[in-house]
Image: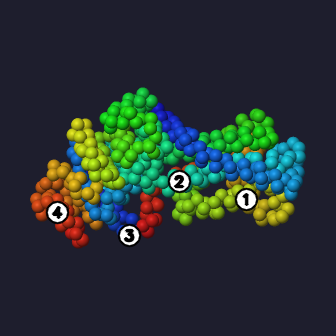
Amino acid sequence: MNALEVSDLSFAYGAREALRQVSFSLAPGRFAALLGPNGAGKSTLIALLTRLYDVQHGDIRVGGYSLSRTPRPALRQLGVVFQQSTLDLDLSVEQNLRYHAALHGLSRRQSALRVEAELARQALTERRRERVRELNGGHRRRVEIARALLHEPRLLLLDEASAGLDPASRLALNQHIRNLCREQRISVLWTTHLLDEVQPSDDLLILHQGRLVASGQADALSLEHGGDLGSAFTRLTTSGAAR
Amino acid sequence: MNAYWQCFSGIVLREWLRFVLQRTRFLSALVRPLLWLLVFAAGFRAALGIAIIEPYDTYIPYEVYIIPGLACMILLFNGMQGSLSMVYDREMGSMRVLLTSPLPRTFLLCSKLLATALISLLQVYAFLAIAWVYGVRPPAMGLLWALPALLLVALMLSALGLLLSNAIRQLENFAGVMNFVIFPLFFLSSALYPLWKMRESSEWLYWLCALNPFTHAVELVRFALYERFNALALAVCVGLTLLFSLLAVLTFNPQHAALRKSG
């Protein structure tokens, strides 16, 4: 069963169409990069995937469960790292994680075990008592990833997670997520506008003017549309290509 | 059921930790009512004599009269501030995290309102403790009686805040809320002066005050503090809390804000 299935998804802000008939799926254990220039509809898609907005047309299924009809099991399978940090800066790393575990209804015992495991996995055990305010950008991101994985989701959604990080931290984060994806068989949807974060074997989704203009393995798409990823992206997202 | 309890206690714990860790915010929330009590009331007492009115058994100094209104003022400010931040944080802040919880949205919102209300009570009791030291001493049992009354008022005002923030986009900054919600609610109520005094100066102002939900909130707390029961105030507060909560939950939709923004 696919970790994520988006079918025929359309969304409009009043008269302005933000997404038009977007369909794609993500298999278990796959790393998918969602690319698109500013205003392509990425933020709207993320808002719909995280249930901030209600689906107007089409369907989103997470782990086989429809997000609009059966939100509870669907949200249980979903971990999210938002573009802007959503941690409580004055709370410690552990307090932030415990809060999230509570939101997912984990018991105290489960919560303690899961927090322990995720802290270890993100190499944050030593920093568990530090206030988030004292951490650097890269570590804060890792806390957010630990938080997103606490309830053991099958799908991890990262919205421009590398934004604001220095190049070394950005690379490390990208690599870290790929390892998780490989080792834990978690599916990852990684939105970005940076082409160097995409690897040839990744699934690639390109959004432009609210439409999905390309989807497939990155190396195959590159070959098909111009030889390298950069020129393929440019060709697919020059104005009018979506029509 | 256990998941609901874990979630609720997690939300309360977070509010508690934020309250403990942000001591300056707590202190500044206390400064406002204390200024009213120590400065305004001291100056005003000479100008205003309070006759014997329910629930008091004797003549009271103005400081005694003003205490329930100031306790409710703390709840009013906290309720409005809390609800406003809930609505305008949701695009990127902690509200987004809250909404990724698999538990029902209504439950999450109500838990958040209740958690904010519980923390506000701590501020009210800190204020009452200072007032006690200052010399304003309601009966000890009254302080206990006032607890459910204060909790109900806190919930009512938070729900009203959430409802207003959902409905009125112009309220996105706190100055707007102060001018158009907090000040009218506070000044057009029995918080600072008894309604019969108001009636002496203007009949229609009296009626505005009498219809103001905040008047009933203040009276509920005033009566409870003196171990008395005010059925009308309780009925109004319970009814409005239910109504405001229902409407607030029904109208809470982040999408509306986004659609309004683009529209």
Pointer 3 chain = A
Q: Give the spatial CA distance, label 4 vs label 2.
A: 43 Å
Q: Between marks 2 and 1, how big is the CA–CA gap?
A: 24 Å
**Mark 1 belongs to chain:** B
Q: Is residue B175 above or below residue B156?
A: below
Q: Position of residue A172 (x, y in %)?
A: 27, 45
Disc 3 target residue: A15
Do the residues under discs 2 and 3 have CB atoms within 8 angstroms? Answer: no
Residue B22, placed above or below residue A115:
below
Residue A232 got which mark? Answer: 4
Residue occupying the point 48% across, 41% down: A91
Q: In the rendered image, which quarter contains the N terminus of chain A? A: top left
Label 3 residue SS = loop
Mark 4: which amino acid?
Ala
Give amino acid for label 3. Answer: Ala
Circle 4: is it few (<14), some (14-19), or many (20+) Cα within 10 Å?
Answer: some
Give the distance between the C-alpha atoms of the residues marked 2 and 3, in whole angstroms. Answer: 29 Å
Q: Mark 1 highlights which residue?
A: B187
Residue at the spot x=72%, y=48% of the render?
Answer: B34
